[in-house]
Amino acid sequence: MVATDILKDLVQKTSSRILLLVCDGLGGLPHPESGKTELETARTPNLDALAQRSNLGIAELVAPGITPGSGPGHLSIFGYDPIQYQVGRGALSAIGIGLDMTPQDVAARINFCTLDEQGRITDRRAGRIPTEESARLAALLQARVTLPGVEAIVRPEMDYRGVLLLRGEGLSDQLSDTDPQITAVPPLPVRPTAPGLDAQHTAELVNRFLDQARQVLRQERPANGVLLRGFAKYPDLPKVADRYQLKAGAVAIYPMYRGLARLVGMELLPTGKTMRDQIETVRQHWSEFDFFFVHFKYTDSAGEDGDFARKVRMIEEVDGYIPDLLALGADVFAITGDHSTPAVLKAHSWHPVPFMLHSRWVLPDEAERFTERHARRGSLGHFHMSQAMVLLLANALKLLKYGA
């Protein structure tokens, strides 16, 4: 791996532009009937034609066998070792929706969920209720839940997700999640994961919040419960302007990914509601930035739902946008995922993700398609995703020679 201090001495400011498209949960596994992955099943003439003029590889997000969350996955893509830089989901969600976190604050991601009469989880996402419904429920919790000595801020994020932010003295983020990640069992109680009175006190406060939330939501359907994940304080990360001499813009619809981009110093740009809107935003701001991060969520959502056919359709939708993305004229264009979400698993997985890099300086691999198996045979080989930014910078001619 290229050490950060060495890289910092090599980067230089140039006029070249880099465009990075992240298709969330892109990697997959073969369908038991066809033996083909989602990428192999999809009709992707544009991605395949680009693969024939690009370099391909397969990238590890954290380490072999380790299943990455979206936070570690994206940090790895942006060139940050996700083991060294650990960022909790709650902080990402809070920052992504525009909450200003103080050093004393602790944030957690909320999933509105469905509970049966025995208090067991029947749906961890409450039927993927729309954002408008989450906003109503968040307002209900905000109005009716009170905690001694701290301010409890409840806000909607997107779809079935929300944010809980606790503001007060002596709070700790060393807390366990309440989401057991499975159904047919009750939510878990919050427990301190480190010794000390602060963690114990905060755990007691959060459990009081959960008790009150259950009472407030008990008559609601389908969202009559909440699950909490990723307790976190505000992390202080190095910025891409300092590490890479880049002025970076982020175009992501989902707040958590906007939070990630903001944490590493990217400017958040307007998104609209569709990929077409995102591309138009990049076009309008093209002259202002030399790095663009564009995020596409719906490959991951389909995989988590176990909907193989829908994930195939989402990949085909991305394929339709490739000509417009190429028409922007980036000097370097790369496509990858932040993790694999095989529909057959209905969850994130530990499998490495395909990576494609296109620039005028590549010697093409002459791959036939952009798929997991073709990526494994590509010239980039099997590499760690935290090195991807070095490849992008090199192909953008933004790195000086190392040594005499």
Image (spheres, grey):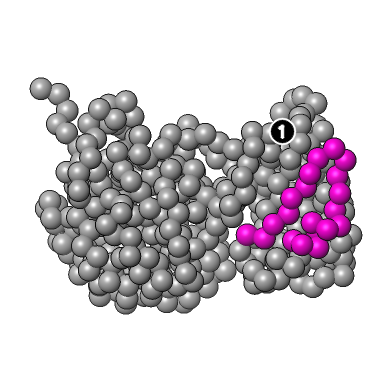
The magenta segment: 138-157
Quadrant hosting residue 205: top right
Q: Is residue 169 left or right of residue 240?
A: right
Left or right of 335 on screen, residue 187 = right
> Which residue is denoted by mark 1 in the rendering?
172
**Residue 254's spot in the image, x, y percent?**
53, 61
Report whether 370 appears left or right of 296. left
Three-letter residue code for mark 1:
Ser
Query: Is 23 in the magenta?
Result: no
Splitting the image into 4 quarters, where does residue 377 fall?
bottom left
Residue 307 pos. (x, y %): 52, 73
Q: Is residue 26 above or below residue 78?
A: below
The front one of 181 and 253 is: 253
Image point (81%, 63%), residue name: 140
Q: Quadrant of the C terminus?
A: top left
Assign the N terminus to one quadrant of the image: top left
Q: Is residue 305 above or below residue 243?
A: below
Residue 138 visible to the viewer:
yes
Residue at horizontal 34%, vertical 55%?
292
Which residue: 25% across, 72% down?
323
11 lies left or right of 385:
left
**Where's residue 238, x and y in %?**
43, 34
Q: Does the rendering let one see residue 354?
A: no
Q: Residue furthest top?
A: 404
Q: Residues within 10 Å of mark 1 (few under 14, many from 20)?
A: many
Q: Check the image and report above or below for 297 versus 109.
A: below
Q: Residue 170 or 363: which is nearer the viewer?
A: 170
